C-alpha cells in the first residue's frame, strides 16, 4: 500500500478502474450512436432502451432458456439488433426525407414505450445477474485488487471498438459505408443497395448497444431505467467528441470515463456533473467538438 | 429544421383569416371562466401552468425552430426558487414569482449562450445534458430538500391583501397570469422581432446574409422562452405548494415536448390544447401506473408518423384558417 496525493492507492486505482469500466460503456454506446448518425443522420434516442433490452435479454435467456452469459453475449446482440432492423425498416425509413428532428422525436417515443413496458413487467428495482463462473474472482496486482470480470469488460470493449473501427475504416464494406455517407445517390448508381445498408447499419449500432447491455448486466443490476440516465451522459460524450470520427468517439468515451473516476476520488460531489461541465467548456472553446468536423 | 413546419403544413400567415384567432381566443377564455364550476380547480390550475409552459416552449421550437430537450431546467429551478422565497424568505407571492422568473432568465442566458453554438440535433442533446447537470445540482443542493422537495409552500397574500388560500381565488390569479403570458407570447411572435425569428426558422443562412445577427435573436428568444417557462414553474410551486425533483427531471422536458407536438408545433393554440390533453391523460390514467409512459411514447410515434401538424394544426389546415 502506498499513497498518491494523500489518497490510498487502493482507492485511487479502484476508482480509476471503475472509470475505465464506465468509459468502456461510454465508448461502446457513443460508437454505436456515431455509426448510426453517420448513415441515418439521426440521433438514436432509443439507444439507452436498446442497451437495457440487451441486459434484459441476458437475464431472460438465463431464467427461461438456461442460456448463460457466453450464449447471451452472442444471442442478445443479434436478437436486439434484429428488432433494430425492424424499427428502421418500418418506422425510421418513412422519415428519411424529413427533418432529422422527427427521427429524434420518434426514437424518443420508442424509448418511452420500451421503458414503460419493462417497468410494467419487472418493476423499478434491479434484478441480479451473476458473473460467469470462469470470470469469477480476481487477482492482486500489488497496488490494487483487479476482479477478473472487470478486466474482461475492458479488454472486450477495446477489442469490439477496434474491430468496428477496422471494419469501417479499413475494409471494402466499410468503404461502401463511408461512400454512402458522403453521397448516397452516387453509391446507389454503382449498384449498391444503399437502403438495405442503412437498415443493417442501424441494426449493427443497436446490436452494439445490446452487447454493452449484456456486458453491463453482471456489473450493474438489470433494471428498466438503467439506460435512460446513462444515455444522457453518452449524449454529452458525443457532443464533446463530435460525431465526425469513429476513433474520436472511442477515445472520448474512455477518456471521460477515467476523468469521471478521478473526480470521484478528488472531488466526489462533482462526479455526477463533471462530464456535463466539460461539455459546456468544450462547446465554448471548440463548438464542433474535439474530433468533430465543422458544425 | 426549416422544413419542419412546411412538412407539418402550417398554413402561411394570412391577415384576412386572423379573425379565427380572435374567435378561438374568446372561446378559450369563456371555457376557462366556466370551467372551475364544472371541473376540479386544482386540475385546471395544473393544466393552465403546463399550457403556459408549452406555449413558452413552442416560442422556441415552433417559431425559431430550436428543439430544446432541457426545458425542465427552467421550469423546475424557477419552481424551487419561488418555493424557497415564499417559504424561507417569506416573500409575498408576486415577489416570489418574480424571483423565480429572474432565476429562469439567468439560467436561460447561460444555457442559451452555450447551446446556440450548435444547431439541430446537437442543440437538443446539449440542452438535455445541461438540464441533467442542473438536475444533479438540485438533487445535491441543501435548499431543495433532495428527494423530499420543498413542501408546505405558503401561497400568501397577493400585493398584501388578496388572500390566495382559497382555490377559486388562486384559480383567478393563475388564469390572469397565464392569459397575460399567452398574450405576451402572441405579441412576440407577431412583432418585427418575431418575424425575424420565423425568418431564422425558414432559412438561417439567408437571414444572416440579410444582415441580421441571428445568434443574438436566437439567444433573446431562448431567454424569453426560459423566463416564461420559469413563470409557469413558479405558478405551479404556489398552486401545489410544492417544488420537487419531478419538475427538473428530463421526463418533464419530454412532457412539454409531447404537449406541444400533440397540440401542433408553431400554432398559437396548439400548446394549450396539448397541455390540457396530456395533463388530463396523466390524471385519469394515473391508476394504470407505467402504462402512462407507454401511451405517451405511442402518442409520440403516432404524431411523428401520421400526424405531424398536431391536433390544432390539423383543424387549422382543414378549416383553412390560422389557429
Image (tube, helix red, strand yellow):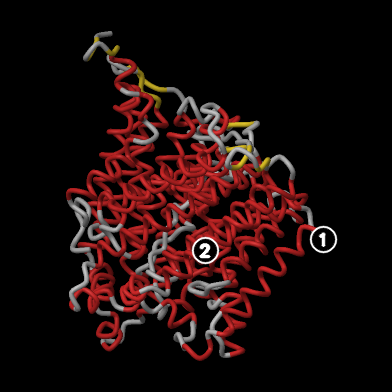
Looking at the rendered structure, the secondary structure element under dot 1 is loop
Indicate the quadrant containing the N terminus of chain B: top left, top right, bottom left or bottom right.
bottom left
- Which numbered disc, 1 or 2, marks the residue that appears first in the sequence? 1
What is the secondary structure assignment of the residue under circle 2? helix
Residue highlighted by disc 1 = B38
Give the CA distance from mark 1 to mark 2.
25 Å
Q: Which residue is drawn at the image coordinates 44% and 36% (left, top)?
A: B136
Q: Residue furthest toward the right?
A: B38
When asked about the image quadrant of residue A186, the answer is: bottom left
Can you give x and y, in whole percent of width and height, for residue A98 in the image?
42, 78
Q: Please give the residue where the numbered disc 2 appears in the rendered image.
A: B55
Chain ID at mark 1? B
The residue drawn where x is 43% and y is 43% is B132
Residue drawn where x is 77% and y is 49% of the image: B287
- Regarding residue A70, the answer to whether it shows in the image is no
Quarter of the image where the C terminus of chain B is located:
bottom right
The residue lying toward the viewer, choosing from A292 and B166, is B166
- Between tags 1 and 2, which lies in front? 1
The chain under label 2 reads B
Residue B60 point in image, percent of width and height: 41, 64
Q: Is residue B170 visible?
A: yes
Residue A229 against residue A289 in the figure, above or below: above
Establish if B184 lies above or below A50: below
Amino acid at each position: 500500500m502506498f499513497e498518491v496525493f494523500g489518497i490510498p492507492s487502493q482507492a485511487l486505482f479502484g476508482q480509476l478502474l471503475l472509470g475505465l469500466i464506465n468509459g468502456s460503456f461510454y465508448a461502446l454506446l457513443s460508437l454505436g450512436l456515431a455509426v448510426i448518425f453517420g448513415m441515418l443522420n439521426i440521433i438514436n434516442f432509443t439507444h439507452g432502451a436498446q442497451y437495457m433490452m440487451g441486459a434484459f435479454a441476458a437475464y431472460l435467456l438465463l431464467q427461461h432458456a438456461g442460456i448463460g452469459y457466453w450464449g447471451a453475449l452472442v444471442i442478445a446482440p443479434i436478437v436486439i439488433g434484429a428488432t433494430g432492423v425492424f424499427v428502421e425498416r418500418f418506422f425510421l425509413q418513412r422519415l428519411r426525407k424529413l427533418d432529422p428532428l422527427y427521427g429524434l422525436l420518434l426514437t424518443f417515443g420508442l424509448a418511452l414505450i420500451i421503458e414503460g413496458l419493462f417497468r410494467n413487467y419487472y418493476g423499478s428495482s434491479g434484478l441480479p445477474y451473476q458473473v460467469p463462473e470462469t470470470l469469477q474472482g480476481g487477482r492482486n496486482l500489488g497496488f490494487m485488487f483487479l476482479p477478473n470480470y472487470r478486466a474482461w469488460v475492458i479488454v472486450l470493449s477495446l477489442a469490439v471498438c477496434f474491430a468496428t473501427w477496422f471494419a469501417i475504416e479499413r475494409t471494402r464494406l466499410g468503404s461502401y459505408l463511408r461512400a454512402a455517407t458522403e453521397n448516397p445517390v452516387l453509391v446507389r448508381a454503382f449498384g449498391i443497395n444503399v437502403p438495405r445498408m442503412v437498415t443493417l447499419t442501424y441494426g449493427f449500432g443497436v446490436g452494439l448497444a445490446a452487447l454493452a447491455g449484456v456486458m453491463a448486466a453482471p456489473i450493474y443490476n438489470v433494471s428498466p431505467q438503467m439506460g435512460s440516465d446513462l444515455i444522457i451522459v453518452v449524449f454529452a460524450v458525443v457532443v464533446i467528441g463530435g460525431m465526425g470520427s469513429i476513433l474520436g468517439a472511442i477515445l472520448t468515451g474512455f477518456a471521460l470515463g477515467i476523468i469521471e473516476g478521478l473526480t470521484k476520488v478528488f472531488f466526489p460531489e462533482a462526479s455526477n456533473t463533471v462530464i456535463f461541465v466539460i461539455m459546456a467548456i468544450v462547446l465554448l472553446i471548440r463548438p464542433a467538438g474535439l474530433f468533430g468536423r465543422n458544425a | 429544421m426549416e422544413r419542419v413546419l412546411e412538412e407539418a403544413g402550417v398554413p402561411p400567415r394570412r391577415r384576412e383569416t386572423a379573425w379565427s384567432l380572435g374567435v378561438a381566443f374568446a372561446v378559450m377564455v369563456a371555457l376557462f371562466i366556466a370551467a372551475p364550476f364544472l371541473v376540479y380547480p386544482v386540475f385546471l390550475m395544473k393544466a393552465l401552468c403546463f399550457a403556459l409552459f408549452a406555449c413558452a416552449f413552442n416560442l422556441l421550437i415552433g417559431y425559431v425552430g430550436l428543439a430544446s430537450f432541457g426545458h425542465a431546467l427552467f421550469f423546475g429551478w424557477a419552481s424551487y426558487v419561488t418555493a424557497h422565497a415564499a417559504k424561507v424568505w417569506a416573500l409575498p407571492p408576486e415577489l416570489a414569482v418574480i424571483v423565480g422568473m429572474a432565476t429562469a432568465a439567468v439560467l436561460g442566458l447561460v444555457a442559451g449562450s452555450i447551446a446556440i453554438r450548435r444547431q439541430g440535433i446537437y442543440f437538443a442533446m446539449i440542452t438535455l445534458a445541461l438540464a441533467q447537470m442542473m438536475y444533479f445540482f438540485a438533487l445535491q443542493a441543501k435548499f431543495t430538500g433532495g428527494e423530499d422537495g420543498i413542501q408546505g409552500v405558503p401561497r400568501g397574500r397577493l400585493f398584501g391583501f388578496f388572500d390566495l388560500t382559497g382555490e377559486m381565488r388562486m384559480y383567478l390569479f393563475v388564469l390572469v397570469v397565464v392569459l397575460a403570458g399567452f398574450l405576451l407570447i402572441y405579441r412576440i411572435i407577431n412583432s418585427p422581432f418575431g418575424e425575424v425569428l420565423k425568418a431564422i426558422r425558414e432559412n438561417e443562412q439567408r437571414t444572416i446574409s440579410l444582415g441580421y445577427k441571428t445568434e443574438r435573436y436566437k439567444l433573446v428568444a431562448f431567454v424569453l422562452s426560459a423566463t416564461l417557462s420559469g413563470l409557469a414553474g413558479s405558478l405551479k410551486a404556489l398552486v401545489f405548494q410544492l417544488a420537487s425533483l419531478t419538475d427538473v427531471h428530463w421526463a418533464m422536458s419530454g412532457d412539454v415536448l409531447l404537449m406541444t407536438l400533440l397540440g401542433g408545433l408553431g400554432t398559437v393554440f396548439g400548446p394549450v390544447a396539448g397541455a390540457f390533453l396530456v395533463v388530463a391523460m396523466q390524471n385519469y390514467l394515473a391508476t394504470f401506473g407505467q402504462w402512462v409512459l407507454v401511451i405517451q411514447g405511442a402518442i409520440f410515434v403516432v404524431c411523428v408518423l401520421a400526424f405531424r401538424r398536431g391536433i390544432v394544426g390539423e383543424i387549422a389546415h382543414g378549416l383553412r384558417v390560422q389557429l
